[in-house]
Image: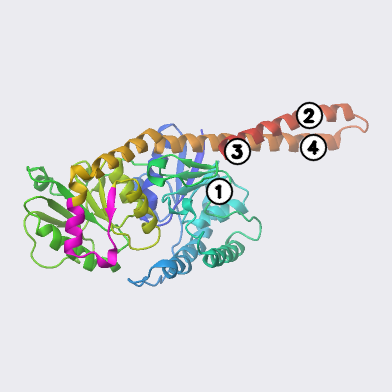
């Protein structure tokens, strides 16, 4: 059986897809371990998860609420992702040495995993939990792309040593992309990018949610959520959503996720405000989702055939929002201009059967399930591990042959020639395995 080490950032939306894939591998008898933040990982992957702790950067400055576009992208890398990589790298190196994995599975935003694995000559695969990077978002911004290349080169020197030159966001061994063509669209992709569909794994349903409020008969139910990392920007939008939905008592009821306690005033009975919700369990009973176009929330909604109102804030969200609209599975609002009237009209639109948004969302969900999700991701990782094992075996055979050759009597070239031929055959087999999984 194989050994797989998952390296993940301290971000719920990046851990959850990996949890499903890891669970699929464990169910097949493989060993799985994690490198990252222990408390978060055990809360999401289970209390028995094997976790190699990694440090986190201290004193990360809060991101200004109005920061968007290239400025937001620069802030993300300079103020969070690079410091995160530098902080995690020692723990990742220790984890690889102690656990000795066959494959290191590196989240695209935990670049320490890729850089350290590369420096140690280990086989690694990228876990792409958002499809935004797959469409080359910097293609129209060559100066920003050049800046990022330089930033990553400097990070490689500090974290992994000067060896190597692969983009740590895209492994040459393979990229697990948790999406399908139905959402991604016609973007051109290399063969090593595998569209496995979302990895949606069961999560605790949350015993404190008032299911009795939802169980009683009523109008269509709408969820409003801006994810786990947007409290700084969410107050105005959440209050506008509460105002919009509060005026729609005759046709909707709504659950608003408000972890920061940002929604003020007295709310009508058909609105429920909660700091956290069991999102997967809730989606089975929803008719629409209003969100920030975070890839995790979007994919989980579409998995359940639920149409969306998307109001992207920053980072990959505008790209994901565009994919939702292009698929016909929802409507888009400008986050900064989304007032109560616009939010209400958008909710009405996605709930209207004549607009076809529900049908389109269901079609995307069907494509997700057909792709296989965590089972397909596990298939790919097993193939990579098998290829790595064959390559290691061929290398050991070649080394043994070389060692034997140094002790043979002079003139016994026939024997050496025969061994060399066998070694070449093994090497070809190994290379063939690499082709199949790259």
Quadrant of the image occupied by residue 152: bottom right
User: Whole-Å distance between the Cαs marked 1 and 3?
Assistant: 14 Å
Numbered mark located on residue 388 in the image: 3
Marks 1,3: beta carbons within 8 A: no
Q: Residue at x 44, y 32 (%)?
A: 29
Between label 4 and label 3, give the one nearer the viewer: 3
Numbered mark located on residue 402 in the image: 4
Element under disc 2? helix
Q: Vertically, is 258 above or below 103?
A: below
The span shown in magenta is: 330-348
Marks 1,2: beta carbons within 8 A: no
Q: How packed is label 2: few (under 14 Cα within 10 Å), some, or many (20 or more)?
A: few
Element under disc 4? helix
Q: How packed is label 3: few (under 14 Cα within 10 Å), some, or many (20 or more)?
A: many
Q: Residue furthest right?
A: 411
Q: Residue at x 70, y 34 (%)?
A: 427
Identify the residue under disc 1: 171
Between label 4 and label 1, give the one nearer the viewer: 1
């Amino acid at each position: 059986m194989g050994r797989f080490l998952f390296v993940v950032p301290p971000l719920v939306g990046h851990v959850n897809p990996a949890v499903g894939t890891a669970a699929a591998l464990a169910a097949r008898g493989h060993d799985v371990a994690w490198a990252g933040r222990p408390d978060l990982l055990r809360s999401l992957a289970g209390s028995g998860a094997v976790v190699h702790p990694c440090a986190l950067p201290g004193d990360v400055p809060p991101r200004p609420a109005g920061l968007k576009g290239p400025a937001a992208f620069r802030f993300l890398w300079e103020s969070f992702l690079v410091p995160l990589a530098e902080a995690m790298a020692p723990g990742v190196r220790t984890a690889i040495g102690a656990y000795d994995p066959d494959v290191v599975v590196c989240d695209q935003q935990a670049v320490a995993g890729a850089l350290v694995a590369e420096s140690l000559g280990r086989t690694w695969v990228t876990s792409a939990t958002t499809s935004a990077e797959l469409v080359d978002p910097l293609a129209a911004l060559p100066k920003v792309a050049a800046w990022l290349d330089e930033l990553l080169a400097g990070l490689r020197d500090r974290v992994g040593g000067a060896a190597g030159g692969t983009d740590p966001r895209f492994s040459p061994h393979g990229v697990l992309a948790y999406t399908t063509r139905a959402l991604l669209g016609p973007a051109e992709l290399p063969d090593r990018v595998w569209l496995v569909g979302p990895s949606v794994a069961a999560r605790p349903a949350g015993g404190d949610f008032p299911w009795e409020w939802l169980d009683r008969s009523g109008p269509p139910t709408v969820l409003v959520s801006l994810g786990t990392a947007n409290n700084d920007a969410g107050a105005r939008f959440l209050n506008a959503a509460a105002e919009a939905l509060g005026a729609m008592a005759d046709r909707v009821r709504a659950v608003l996720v408000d972890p920061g306690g940002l929604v003020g005033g007295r709310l009508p009975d058909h609105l429920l405000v909660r700091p956290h919700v069991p999102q997967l369990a809730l989606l089975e009973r929803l008719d629409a989702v209003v969100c920030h176009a975070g890839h995790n929330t979007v994919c989980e909604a579409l998995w359940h055939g639920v149409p969306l109102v998307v109001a992207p804030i920053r980072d990959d969200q505008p790209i994901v929002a565009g994919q939702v609209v292009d698929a016909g599975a929802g409507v888009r609002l400008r986050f900064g201009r989304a007032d109560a009237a616009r939010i209400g009209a958008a909710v009405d639109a996605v709930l209207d059967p004549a607009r076809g948004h529900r049908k389109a969302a269901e079609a995307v969900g069907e494509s997700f399930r057909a792709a296989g999700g965590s089972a397909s991701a596990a298939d790919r990782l097993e193939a990579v591990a098998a290829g790595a094992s064959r390559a290691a075996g061929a290398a050991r055979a070649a080394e043994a042959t070389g060692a034997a050759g140094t002790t043979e009597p002079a003139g016994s070239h026939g024997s050496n020639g025969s061994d060399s031929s066998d070694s070449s055959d093994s090497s070809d087999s190994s290379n063939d395995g690499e082709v199949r999984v790259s």
